[in-house]
Image: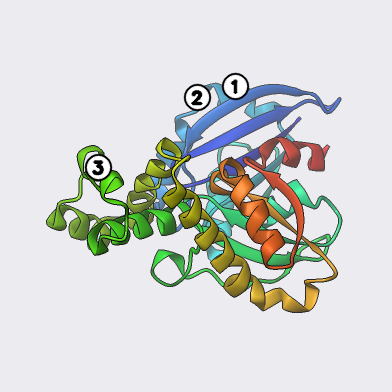
Amino acid sequence: MILVADAGSTKTDWRLVNNEGIVVGAFESGGLNPIVFDDETLNKNLANSGELFNFSENITEVHLYAAGSDETGAQQRLRKILSEVFDFASIHIYNDLLAAARATAGKNPGLVAIMGTGSNSGYYDGEKIVKTIGHFGYALMDDASGNWFGRQLIRDYYFETMPQRLRRIFKKDYKLDDDYIKTHIYLSDQPNAFLAAYSVFMSEHYDEHYVKNLLLRGFRQFMEEEMNAYRDKKDELPVHFVGSIAYFYQKELRQAVKDTGWQLGEIVRKPLDNLVKYHI
């Protein structure tokens, strides 16, 4: 039997697959991002899925795709923790960008972008990610991500470029006290997730002209700036997207891709089910 998992900072989704390639179990545990958590917390988060351990002796392969596992050291930490639970399994650790690529392009070359709480991109040759611009998080990058849109909403509120009627609703529904926002952005452990929480306002008021324009602005910026790093592939390969922001606002995303002259590939909310198909 094999395990395939998709891990973020908040939670990890697991699929148990039998020797006939049939999913026989779906489990959830805590987040396994090695950048966010120390080893003690990683072990504790893994232990949240006690039922999964009942199958540990029958599992021969574990394929874990985890945010924050770009570096060799981070992968080694995760491999050590998993090997202590799954004694008889070969452990394979991959980053979330490869998860997005395999879930959308499969074994074909393509460009891939993640648009969730954060954002990232890369060029995939059908086997591995061979080029990426690097990921410097919410302070420098993360265009068109949940935290980017959350930041823009707060900025538009304070600069009064958000329509007055929406400003009143935003102020009523979201905490906008100066000290509260500054504390969570500059002193909290996960400022990106804090900012991303404000982006929910877009789904609550999706039909507003302001929201649609904000979405188009963010997606066009991503295509014009971040994807410029792969401009030599523009006429050759499609761009695939993974993540909740890309999926739920795909109408505006499709428009932005078209407006900027790129080829659109697949848009997938969560990669896990496609990753299972990749491995069986």
* Residue situated in front as seen by the camera: 39 or 192: 192
Q: Position of residue 35 (x, y in %)?
A: 44, 58
Helix, strand or loop at disc 1? helix
Disc 2: which residue: 50
Q: CA distance from mark 1 to mark 3?
A: 43 Å
Q: Position of residue 36 (x, y in %)?
A: 40, 54
| Among the 4 quarters of the image, the one containing residue 123 | bottom right
How are the residues colored? Answer: rainbow
Characterize the local packing of mark 2: few (<14), some (14-19) or many (20 or more) Cα atoms within 10 angstroms: few
Helix, strand or loop at disc 3? loop
Q: CA distance from mark 2 to mark 1?
A: 7 Å
**Mark 3 or 2, closer to the camera:** 3
| Among the 4 quarters of the image, the one containing residue 269 | top right
Amino acid bearing label 3: Tyr
Q: Is residue 188 visible?
A: yes
Q: What label does residue 174 carry, if any?
A: 3
Helix, strand or loop at disc 2? helix
Q: Are marks 2 and 1 in contact (CB under 8 Å)?
A: yes
* Residue situated in front as seen by the camera: 241 or 95: 241
